[in-house]
Image: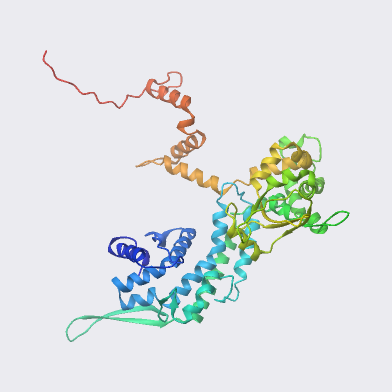
Amino acid sequence: MKLHTKFNRGKMFQQVKSVANHNGYGKDVKFKVLSRTCGTRFSTSQYSEFLKLSESLLLYIDTFRKYGYDEDDEYEITGKDFVVDLLALTDLMSPMVDLLVSLQCLSVPSWKICLWWSKVRQRIQKCIPISFDSPDLPLTSNNIRDIKKGKFKGTKVVPGWLKFEKNVFEEVSDGKKTTTTKWRARDLKVCRVDLEVFRVAMIKSIDLRFSGKSVKRMQKQIVAVDLDELISLCCGHKNLTAVVVDEVKFENYGKQEFLSFWTYICSLPHIKNLYGLFKGELSHIVHRNVKQALKSIIWEKKYREIMKQWFNVLPDNDGQNDGIANEPLCDFSILDDTEARACLELGGNCLPLQNVYRMEFQNGKIALTVVNEDKMYETIYTNETVYSLIEPEGCIAVDISLGKGGTEAVVESVYSAMGSQNQLGPISNETLTLRTKINWCMPTALTAERAVKEIANIYIKGDKEKGLKAHILPVIQSAVRGNR
């Protein structure tokens, strides 16, 4: 039975709405309408449908049993195996979807996949071997005890059976057709094996994309100037005399990658003639200057106002947010992945794969924060204190890295513009490309009144010098007959 077609519209849709409105379900049960095309969409859309179904499954089960019961379908919609598969698939896909959605944000450069995929891969690998009680599978672990007892959110679920074959044959005696259906038992052990196969296939599919042509070599080099990662190198504590960080990690991070990237920068025609550290052999000096500038702004109190702009403060478990104190910073650390995920779920203005930092100040106040990279880039371009600390060579490296790290969202916008210019009937690729470029480069009509007027004037009157003919206005004149 296809839930996304059975309950999407018509009688069963009205019935499930009625059940949702007239029964006292708790806050955990929400009526979410499934998309009829959920089986043919992207994996992110598929995940969204799984998530909606996991929240509304109780409503669909109750409606099915009350208004559309069928014995065969019951094992497909209320089987223990189906419920476990649904919850576990949603849990397993969650980190991957976080990655795909985050990479499409307009402010996220494309090289982030080189950093985030390893983090996502680690999250998925933590589920090995798959255990339905694992906190890394939150939806599954919260419901598995009840499912084993034959319940899901208070409603009955039946033993798992999989319909795998139908044979239709004719009886010789009366000529009637009889359908024989073959079933296979699916207990939780079988579900675990199938989910393990899915997990391996999911990791392999992303690995293939990551190791293929979709991630260019330069993107892996630009990771050396990723601001969030450079900030993580500044983690440490302050004693009576100095700030203590992991100097080996601070010095060696991205050394080889930045050497390759800086050598490329120094080979550019408009860079070759500049004075300064524009030689590949001096890349380590440029790289260290950038890292040292970030370290100074974080730890030195005189730069506190700049540091406040660089970080967004997350609320704690009680929803409180004290902000970044003006007192000296005593300890600066990065949370482990499990703690970070819990904090990011509470915060609104952050991405699910960002690093989460813990700041402890001299007055005892603690702040949980994430880096606001948009603001960091803004200050690098506009704040004299910041770009003086980073120095011209570091600013050029950051500027070129942004130019080479165009976001996925820009590509999506170009495709959207191309779609808006597509016309019914045949259209050549050359014409479509030209229309797309014009649409992409032109501002909206509301902000380009002068340009629109000039274009309209040329359209109506033409331009002899450029060989553009005047167009006939599409106006229909009506003749009014009268007495002459």
Residue 399 place in picture, x, y as percent? 68, 41
Q: Quadrant of the N terminus?
A: bottom left
Which sits in the foreground, 143 or 117?
Answer: 143
Q: Is residue 138 left or right of residue 158?
A: right
| Residue lying furthest right | 241
Measured along the vertical axis of the image, is residue 109 above or below residue 163? above
Q: Is residue 237 left or right of residue 226?
A: right
Q: Is residue 207 visible?
A: yes
| Residue lying furthest bottom | 173
Measured along the vertical axis of the image, is residue 418 above or below residue 65? above
Which sits in the foreground, 164 or 317?
Answer: 317
Name the residue rendered at 55%, 45% in the picture.
410
Name the residue rendered at 13%, 17% in the picture.
482
Tag count = 0
Q: Quadrant of residue 455?
A: top left
Residue 90 place in picture, x, y as percent? 50, 67
Residue 381 place in picture, x, y as percent? 69, 38
Measured along the vertical axis of the image, is residue 434 above or below residue 307? above
Which sits in the foreground, 346 or 226?
Answer: 346
Name the residue rendered at 74%, 59% in the picture.
333
Scheme of colours in the image? rainbow
Q: Is residue 407 left or right of residue 270?
A: left
Q: Quadrant of the C terminus?
A: top left
Which sits in the foreground, 454 or 436?
Answer: 454
Residue 8 place in picture, x, y as percent? 34, 61
